[in-house]
Image (cartoon, rainbow, N blue to C red):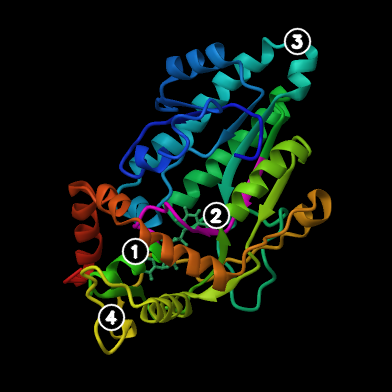
Amino acid sequence: RDTDCQVINVDKLTYAGNLDSLSEIMSSPGHIFEQEDICDGKAMERIFAQYQPDAVMHLAAESHVDRSITGPAEFIQTNVLGTYNLLEAARNFWSGLDEQGRARFRFLHVSTDEAYGDLRPDDQPFTEETPYLPSSPYSASKASSDHLIRAWNRTYGLPVLITNCSNNYGPYQFPEKLIPLMILNALEGKPLPVYGKGENIRDWLYVQDHARALHTVLVKGRPGRTYNIGGNCEKQNIEVVRTICDILDEMKPANGCRIPTAGCRELITFVPDRPGHDLRYAINDTRIRRELGWFPQESFASGLQKTVKWYLDNPQWVERVRTGAYREWIRANYEMQGREGF
Ligand code: DAU
């Protein structure tokens, strides 16, 4: 919306992808959709040759930690091998450009703060120099892909950028992640499954702030450099869930909603912890603030309000993403270790 760029949107449309999320921009001349898999080398070659991009923003990944615990193979396939494949296609294209084109080209890899491991309550937030110490198959696969990106920069000179962001939230998020899962379960009067004691801490970043940060890094970032992106908003999970409950109680949604009359908090249910559960993530975002002038603009209070409202206003989108496969996964995940009734 805010640039003259043309965006070639390449997506495999796995369980979490959904063309409905693109309906607003599908007919825009600034947006072209290609359904392809980054693991398909020939397809990636074709896309580079056909569209001659100035830049790649690589956001394609398996991203849900719980899924990586029950089935790590796809995380290695997409996040590690897919990244390798995309890097090679980009390098082949980039090395065929003239000097000016090579200097202008950018490859931005969108990664995660989880690659750094986790923090104790008194530890200093992650900086770009924090050593990698991933805990889950998901974060290990993202850490691996970051290593590939840096190696392609150092060895071949590919002008890469890496961003490590904290937990995103906002409209259009697939309802396996904490915030949309809690909103939608509450509306149906289902238990709100809080892992362990709910004391784990995440740093919440509104999705529009993240999108602005990615554009800023792409346009102004120094090739070869990493930028942390955070929301400056650390919260315990239980606090997040209670806040969602309070917003829903206040909004009093109608339309077949099954929130208990005593209030949403009644639904909070503590369930066995996630194996290897990271205690705390926190981001030191001094570099992106000082060097590129970016900072988060949304407060958690207003971002969460907007998010809850978006899910209430878009029941059709919700219904369509909740396919049979989604329901099956939710059941399998929360029934694991005897978490029944989810
Ligand atoms: O930090 C960035 C990362 O944030 C991204 O790289 C990941 O792709 C993204 O999924 C997210 O990882 P988390 O594991 O922190 O997100 P998730 O929404 O799965 O969980 C957030 C916290 O809430 C975490 O401490 C686990 C807890 N949780 C999650 C679910 C789904 C619950 O207590 N109950 C739940 O049902």
Name the residue type under label 1: Leu
* Residue sitting nearer the eye, 322 or 274: 322
Relative vertical location of residue 227 with respect to residue 109 in this rendering, above or below: below
Residue 273: % across, % down: 35, 72
Residue in the picture at 66% in, 17% down:
94
Residue in front for this viewpoint, 22 or 27: 27
Percent coordinates x, y for residue 306 in the rendering = 49, 64
Look at the numbered disc 4 and say if its residue's Cβ is closer than 8 Å to ligand 1: no
Q: Amino acid at mark 2?
A: Val
Q: What is the crowding at mark 1: few (fewer than 14 residues within 10 Å), some, or many (at least 20)? A: some
Precedes in sequence: disc 2 or disc 3: 3
Q: Which is more N-terminal, label 3 or label 4?
A: 3
The three-letter amino acid code for the residue at tag 4 is: Leu
Q: Secondary structure at mark 4?
A: helix
Please name the residue shown 57% across and 46% down the image. 111
If you read the primary sequence from the N terminus, does the residue marked by circle 3 or circle 1 appear first? 3
The residue pinned by badge 3 equals 98
User: Which span is picked out in magenta?
Assistant: 162-177
Compute the Cα span from label 4 to label 3: 61 Å
3D distance between C-alphas at marks 2 and 3: 36 Å
